Image (tube, helix red, strand yellow):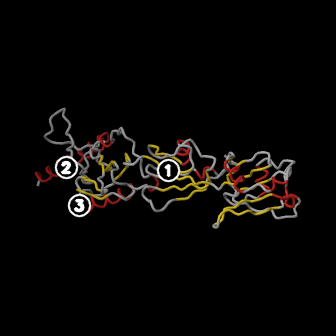
Amino acid sequence: MKSNIRTILAVCCVVVLVGTCIAQTGTVPQTGAVQGVSPQPVSPTVPGVAPVAGNSTATPAATEASPSAQTPIGDMAGMKIGPGDLVRITIFGDPDYRPEIRLDSDGNADIQPLGRVHLGGLTPSEASEMLGKRLLERGLYRDPHVSVAILDYATQGVSVLGEVQKPGVYIIQGERHLFDVISAANGFTPRAGTKVSITHRNQPNKPIVMNVSHDPAASPDSNVVIYPGDTVLVSSAGVIYVVGDVAKPSGFVMDNENLTMLQAVALAGGVNSTAALNDVKIIRKTAEGRKELPVRFNDVLQSKGEDLALKPDDILFVPKSAGKNAAQRGMAAILQAATGVAIYSTHR
C-alpha cells in the first residue's frame, strides 16, 4: 500500500514539474538531448509539399521569401494569361516553392507536382483558385493558398494606329493608360476624331469604343487602362471646308457633328466685305457624285433662311461679288481651292 502511495506522489511531482516548465519556457523538456544542442526542425523532403497542418516545422524567418528581381504584373483587372507568358506560382507557407514557368504556344505549363496544366485564357485569380483545388484533390495540402502572378507578357507591344502623329508599336511594361500611349505616338493629328477603339489581346473580337472628352473634368474617365498586346485605333473626324471670299479659307474638323453654315463661316474668320452672300454654294458628296446646293446666305444672316447643318466632306464656297464671273466659278476650281487649305481642329 505504501509503495502505491509513493508511486502516485512521484507521478504527481513529475506532472507538476512538467507543467511549470511549459508555463515558463513554452517548451517540453526532451530526454536524450545533447547538452547545449537544441533539437532542429525537420524540413519536408518533397519540394513544393508543405507540412501537414498541426505539424508545421517552418520557422518564422523561413516563411519570408526573398524578393525576386522581377516584379509581378498581377491580375491587371481581369487580364488573362496567354501563350508564351511567364508566370510565378507561390504557395503560402512553403517558401521553397516559387517556380517561374513560361507557358508553351498552347497555353500549357509544366507545374510540379501536378504535371501539365492549361493556364491559357485564365486570369491570375482563376488560375490560383484552380491550382489550389487540384493540390487539395491530390491530398498534397490540407488548405493550399496558391498565388499566380504574371511576370512577363509574351507580347508587350501596344499598337497605336489611326490619326496619331507617329503610328506604330510601342513597348510598355506593366500597366499604362490611354493618354500615355497617345503621348508616346506624339499625340493626335488635326484630323483625329473623338472616338478611340481599344482592342484587348484576350478579346480580339470585342473592341471597346471610347469617347475622348475635351472637357478637363471628364478627361480622367477617358483615360482608361491599356495593357500589353492591346491595339489602339484613333478614328478620323469629318472635315468641312470653307473657301472663297472669307478671312481664313480652311478645313475644320467636325468635333461637333451638328456644325452649321454660320458656325463654319465663323471658324473661317467671317466673310469679307466683297463676298456675294446670295451666291453661296455647298458642294456635297453623294452616292451619285458631287452636287451643288445653292444657298442665299444673306437670308441666313438675317434669320430669314435656314442655317443648314453641314456634313463631313462638305465644301462651303463663298464667291466674290466683284465680277459676274466669280459667282459662276466652276466646281473643279472650287475643289482645287479646297484641297490647298490648312486643316484645323477647333479643340486640339
Q: Name the quarter where the N terminus is drawn.
A: bottom left
Q: Which mark is residue 261?
A: none
Q: Which residue is mark 2?
A: 46
* Crowdedness near tag 2: few (<14), some (14–19) or many (≥20) residues, C-alpha within 10 Å: few
Tag nearer the camera, 2 or 1: 1
Residue type at mark 2: give it: Val
Residue type at mark 1: give it: Ile
Q: Which residue is mark 1?
A: 226
Residue drawn at point x = 26 percent, y = 44 percent: 96
Q: CA distance from mark 2 to mark 1?
A: 41 Å
Q: Could you say whether the residue bearing mark 3 is in a helix, strand or loop?
A: loop
Residue drawn at point x = 24 percent, y = 57 percent: 116
Q: Could you say whether the residue bearing mark 2 is in a helix, strand or loop?
A: loop
Locate residue 244 relative to residue 290 in the image: left or right.
Answer: right
Task: Please provide percent x and percent y for residue 143.
Answer: 31, 57
Locate residue 41 relative to residue 249 in the image: left or right.
Answer: left
Mark 3 and mark 1 lie on one chain; the one further toward the N terminus is: 3
Q: Could you say whether the residue bearing mark 1 is in a helix, strand or loop?
A: strand
* Nearer to the camera, 287 or 336: 336
Q: Which residue is mark 3?
A: 138
Snapshot quadrant of residue 204? bottom left
Mark 3 and mark 2 lie on one chain; the one further toward the N terminus is: 2
Q: Residue furthest bottom?
A: 288
Residue type at mark 3: give it: Arg
* Nearer to the camera, 326 or 150: 326
Q: CA distance from mark 3 to mark 2?
A: 14 Å
Mark 2 and mark 1 lie on one chain; the one further toward the N terminus is: 2
Task: Please provide percent x and percent y for residue 342.
Answer: 68, 45
